[in-house]
Image (spheres, rainbow, N blue to C red):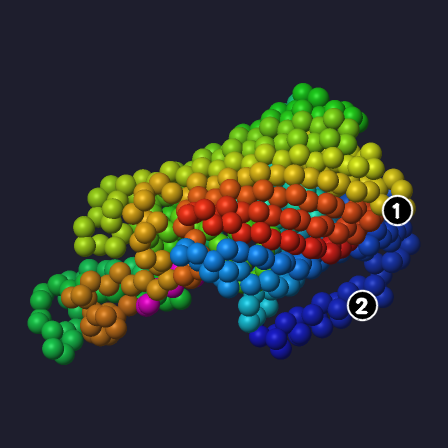
Amino acid sequence: MSKMTNNKLAMLALAGLGAFASGPAFAAGMTVDTKGGLEVFELDENNFWFKISGRLFFDQAFFDADDDDLITSSAFPSGAHIRAARVTLKGGVGHDWVYKFDIDLKDRPGSTTADFGEAFIGYSGCKNFWVALGQVSIPFGLENWQSSNDNMFMELSLATSAFAPDKGLGLYAEWHGHWVTAAAALYHPQIAGSRQTGDVVAFPAAVPVAAGFPAPAVRSVAGTGPLNSDPGSDDVGFGARITFSPIHDDYTTYHAGIAARYESLHEHANDFNYIAGYEVRARQTPVLFTNIPPNSADSHDVWGFELAGQWGPLLIQGEYMVANVERDEVFDPRDIRSPGGELDYYGYYVQASYVLTGEKREYDFDSGTFGAVHPVSRKGAWELGIRHSFINFVDNQSFVSNQVFEFVDFVPPFAADQFGVPAPQAGNNFRTGFTANDIVGSAHSTTIGLTWWVNDNVRFLANYVRTSLPFSQDVDAFGLRGQVSW
């Protein structure tokens, strides 16, 4: 999206808001409220209402990395970025019907893009049951399922970062009992506006013959690439989470949960990898990844197990996650996808926090998450936290020493594309997005954080992170965040 298009959208949104504010919405019977955002609703009923909210995270990160044969310290440049910026519109439209859509602004090197976050219509007319249709969040994990506004640290743990799902297009439902909650989603993993990736190789009865090539009756045809390939119908995924909390009073909470998700993939036409970000990040910070060769995965599934206990200002929680990637058992030895076989990965984290000023994190039983600290004093509240996390991204050692699949084309030397162009020009120079600075392997990370909750809308975070990478390389990082949500 161009800068001009972004500006036009912003002007139209402001114009619409101005028209809304000056129109009959503020007629008799309507009430306006604000806690940083804007909410308009009927005083006596809750059938029609409208709310604007959002958030902004600004981060500064400083890195100090060892120089060795694995990666140089220059691969960890310090820097600042807009970590998150979101505008949310939601409301009620008649009895029991609601809608919501988020616009997420993402700051990437060289560009800023606007994408949809959640965008759905929901129905809440049944007691303790709620359903939504559209682009929805996929239920998985304690740390992942709570709001980013309330996370204990600047970034999610290595394990959650790697294995928690993004959003999907489909159907979401949740139910609440007295001690148990359940949530599930049936969805297409691709978010709105995205297209399938992969280099599809077709085998037609005959294709044009390229100059200088023999003329076989059958010749492979390379796919035309991520923006033009058509690898078939959308993939299908299923995710579910069940939580159990027999005690959740004003002082004590006991929580347990289990979650799972499964996603089919376009067979031999995908660039699937698990990716984990560091627990303090700048815009150019490398990532950890599994280095699964593109176009080799068929499906994957992830299981998560969670436990937590809260006693007043003290909160302790942890999660363990295990993942499996289904692949063909055997590839041709000359194929860079070789060796074949399924792959298994796992990760975990354990963390604790203590609110020094005596407040406690609120527990939301319906979502099975721990929320914000609400300061009692006008001076705010202070929270101290510590976390240790681990991720195992090594199953097959051959993928660790394999090339980083930055540009890959699975085009056999005898192939031609649909225009008759022979290899190696045939195909798409498929790009996975990884670079030589990204690391394949297991990692430990320890984070110490201090948070100042200024009020219900503003907080400041300071995190120190020490990450141990393969070959005994250590990276120290210090991150600062200013955050406002409304």
| Mark number displayed over residue 379 | 1
Q: Which mark is nearer the camera, 2 or 1? A: 1
Q: Amino acid at mark 1?
A: Lys
Q: Where is the N terminus found, in terms of image quarters?
A: bottom right
Q: Distance between the Cα atoms at labels 2 and 1?
A: 35 Å
Q: Quadrant of residue 323?
A: top left
Circle 2 is placed at which residue position?
18
Q: Do we see residue 155 in this rendering?
A: yes
Q: Which residue appears at 22% of the width and 54% of the height? A: 335
| Mark number displayed over residue 300 | none
Residue count near mark 2 (Cα–Cα under 10 Å), binned few <14, some 14–19, many ≥20? few
Q: Is residue 430 part of the magenta span, yes or no?
A: yes
- Who comes first in sequence, dot 2 or dot 1? 2
Residue count near mark 1 (Cα–Cα under 10 Å), binned few <14, some 14–19, many ≥20? few
Segment tinted magenta in the rendering:
428-433
Please determine whether, in this image, residue 318 is positioned above or below residue 59.
above
Q: Amino acid at mark 2?
A: Gly
Report the side of 187 relative to 92 (left or right).
left
Give how far across and how far down residue 32 sits, in percent. 87, 53
Q: Which residue appears at 67% of the width and 49% of the height? A: 463
